[in-house]
Amino acid sequence: MIKVVDLHKSFGPLQVLKGVDEHIKKGEVVSIIGPSGSGKSTFLRCLNLLEQPDSGQIFFEGVEITDKKININEHRQKMGMVFQHFNVFPHLTVRENITLAPSLLKKVTQVQAQEQAMELLSRVGLADKADEYPRRLSGGQKQRLAIVRALAMNPDVMLFDEPTSALDPEMVGEVLNVIQSLMSAGMTSVIVTHEMGFAKEVSNRVLFMDEGIIMESGSPEEVFNQPQNFRTKDFLSRVLH
Amino acid sequence: MLETIEKLLTQYWFLFAKGTGYTLLLSGITVFFSSIIGTVFAMLRMSNWQIGKFRPLHFLITAYVEIIRGTPMLVQLYFFYFLLPKAVPQLDFSPFTCITVACIVNSVAYVAEIIRAGIQAVDKGQMEAARCLGMSQKQAMVKIIIPQATKNVLPALCNEFVTVIKETSIASTFFVGELMSQYKAITGALYLTIEPLIIIAVIYFVLTFSLSKAIAVFERRLQSGD
């Protein structure tokens, strides 16, 4: 579904990605773990061209989206993204946050968009908040809203960029539950996370990134229980107690 | 003194009314055009169109803003008062037109700065989230960024409009008929200084104060949103 070939990205003199190759298949749940500054968020943000790679190619559903001639907006509609800091729209109600993009871009009628929004909201337990503004929501509720906002576009893949890192500890669970139910329903997902237990439980595959490359890739059992690379071992020994 | 003020108001009210009218006309035209042109300039200044490393639009508008902000209003008024009729003699500009143009040119620079700051104050995650949903740059700007920026800029913009009303008094140097010009006329004719001054000060205050209050109400209405 997403194929990445020899991806490079620098910010000024700092080389963040130094040649990443990866193939994410339909229905797969891929977790990306690694120390801070290893390039995992940058890699994720390159997948929908939120960061423009310096070189390399990205194919999404067979189309090269790094090609300058394609209309990236069309392809982004099929790639949902969830951010660390939620980025819900504060000037719109919860319901409008969800209906805006579909009614603007997908030519669904207001009524259809509304129905879908309510259905999504009740799925994540926010139906009673539909007419509130986001400032009245807790962090966990904002993140659940951000997730269903992305789902309203019916994406083929979901990208999660540290979705629980900005949450108070007691709210991590509710957000992970939503993400997990999505994944078990077969949504192709890529998640950058520091929640090792979660990564171990939900992933089909775990990528360990460090120094701008994928150092190790394998099933959760392989990566967590029998890491081959000494950097992976070192990292895991520091984060798993 | 109160008697004199009363007498002035009953005998010469039409001069004060005319002055108020011209002040409102001059500042109204200025505010109208500077809001539109200022917004466009703010957008152009933020545009990324470049030739090599050089961003011509950014450079030109930044230079314009800096020059206007770095020179006195009075100098700018003189400049346009003398320059415009010479530059396009065919159009036969009246002093009022020259001064209006000068006021607009002045105010545009400030409005452009206010709007640029307001847009840049919107968290950049908002633009990213909008683009990730598949919106174009323009759609994201119109639906997500500008509504939030409006709230950011309203207080500063209101300030600028109050300033415009007050600064039109400088235009009296060229006797274009606004309040301060009427004051000069009355003083010249009646040898009265303080009394007419008090009257026009009150009028200026009523104008600016009611504008501030009106915008505050509007602002509260927007704020009730989030």
Image: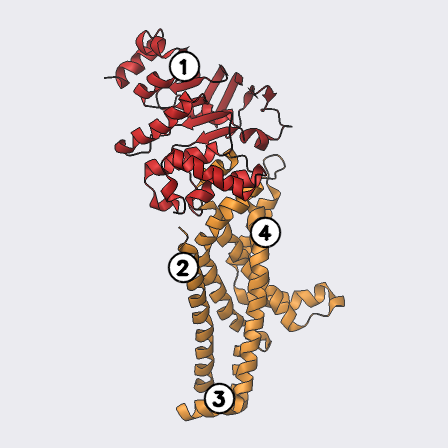
Q: Disc 3 vs disc 2: which is toward the camera?
A: 2
Name the disc covering residue A204, or none: 1
Q: Which chain is the one coloured red?
A: A
**Residue under label 2:** B220
**Residue under label 3:** B9
In front here: A86 or A154?
Answer: A154
Same subunit, labels 4 and 2: the answer reads yes
Answer whether labels 2 and 1 touch (C-beta < 8 Å).
Answer: no
Mark 2 Cα shell of 10 Å, populated few (<14), some (14-19), many (≥20) = few
Same subunit, labels 2 and 1: the answer reads no
Q: From the viewer's perspective, is B218 left or right of B26?
A: left
Kindly indicate the quadrant of the structure image that contains residue A237. top left
**Disc nearer the start of the sequence (3/2):** 3
Q: For the point 36% across and 36% down, which residue is it?
A: A125
How far is disc 4 from disc 1 in space, using C-alphas?
A: 50 Å
**Disc nearer the start of the sequence (4/2):** 4
**Residue under label 4:** B40
Q: Disc 4 vs disc 1: which is toward the camera?
A: 1
